[in-house]
Image (cartoon, grey):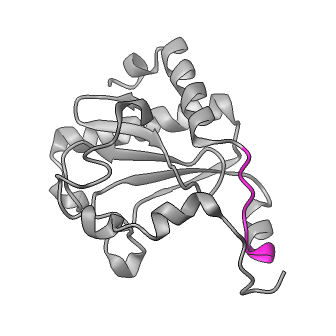
C-alpha cells in the first residue's frame, strides 16, 4: 500500500463530515455534554468513561469531565482527583480484559495539538509490542473489537471487581 492510498472507512463518514468541532464549543450541542447514557461505561459524580466511537485501536477509551471545560487548568481539585482515579480504573479494567503490554494516555488541547472536540477528554490506548511499527508500515489499523462490545465487557469487569470502591469513585 502506498503512503497516500485511501482505505474506505464508512463508519467514520458521519464524524468526518459533521460539525462536531464547531458544535463541541457549546455545552448545549457538545457530543460529550449530551452523551447518551447507553454509551457511558461508568460514571462518577464529576467524570465519565466511554469507549471511543472512532477508535485508533482496540480498547480505546475516553475519560471525560461532565462539566464542559477544555483546559486541564480549569478542572477543580475534585474533578482532577476523579479524572485520574477514572484513568486508573480504566487501566485496571483493560489489564483484566485485554492484558496490554503498555498504554498511551493523554489529551490534545488546541487545534495545533490535534484537538477535534472542544471538551477536555483523555484517551486511554492499550498498546502491544509491534503494533506501532505495523501501523507505520501499512498506514492503517484493523480493529476487530467494537466499542459496544468493549463497553459491555468493561461494565461487567467494573461491577464484578467492585472497581468503583477500589478507585474511590
Identify the residue shown where x is 81% and y is 86%. Answer: 2
Q: Is residue 68 left or right of residue 124?
A: left
Magenta stretch, main secondary structure, is: loop
Task: From the viewer's side, name the closer residue of 112 and 33.
Answer: 33
Identify the residue shown where x is 46% and y is 32%. Answer: 89
Location of residue 9 in the rendering, given as x and y in whole percent from the top left corner: 66, 64
Q: Is residue 150 left or right of residue 143?
A: left
Q: Is residue 101 visible?
A: yes
Location of residue 67 in the rendering, given as x and y in whole percent from the top left corner: 19, 46
Location of residue 126 in the rendering, given as x and y in whole percent from the top left corner: 63, 48
Given the current orientation, which residue lies at the most extreme right position? 1
Q: Is residue 40 visible?
A: no
Which of the image's four quarters has the C terminus?
A: top left
Location of residue 16 in the rendering, given as x and y in whole percent from the top left corner: 48, 69
> What is the quadrant of residue 108 in the picture?
bottom left
71 inside magenta stretch = no
Task: From the viewer's side, name the closer residue of 140 and 165.
Answer: 140
Q: Which residues are magenta?
A: 136-144
Identify the residue shown where x is 22% and y is 41%. Answer: 79
> What is the quadrant of residue 141 in the picture?
bottom right
> What is the quadrant of residue 48 in the picture?
top left
Which of the image's four quarters has the N terminus?
A: bottom right
Identify the residue shown where x is 45% and y is 70%. Answer: 17
Vertical comparison of 150 with 128: above or below: above
Q: How many marks?
A: 0
Amino acid at each position: 500500500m502506498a503512503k497516500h492510498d485511501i482505505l474506505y472507512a464508512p463508519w467514520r463518514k458521519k464524524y468526518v463530515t459533521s460539525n462536531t468541532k464547531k458544535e463541541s464549543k457549546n455545552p448545549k450541542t457538545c457530543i460529550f455534554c449530551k452523551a447518551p447514557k447507553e454509551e457511558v461505561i461508568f460514571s462518577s459524580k464529576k467524570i465519565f468513561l466511554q469507549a471511543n466511537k472512532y477508535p485508533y485501536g482496540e480498547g480505546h477509551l475516553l475519560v471525560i469531565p461532565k462539566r464542559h471545560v477544555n483546559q486541564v487548568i480549569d478542572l477543580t481539585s475534585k474533578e482532577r482527583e476523579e479524572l485520574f482515579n477514572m484513568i486508573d480504573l480504566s487501566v485496571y479494567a483493560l489489564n483484566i480484559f485485554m492484558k496490554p503490554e503498555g498504554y498511551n494516555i493523554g489529551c490534545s488541547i488546541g487545534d495545533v495539538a490535534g484537538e477535534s472536540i472542544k471538551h477536555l477528554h483523555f484517551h486511554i490506548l492499550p498498546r502491544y509490542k509491534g503494533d506501532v511499527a505495523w501501523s507505520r508500515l501499512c498506514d492503517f489499523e484493523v480493529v476487530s473489537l467494537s466499542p459496544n462490545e468493549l463497553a459491555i465487557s468493561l461494565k461487567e469487569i467494573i461491577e464484578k471487581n467492585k472497581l468503583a470502591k477500589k478507585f474511590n469513585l
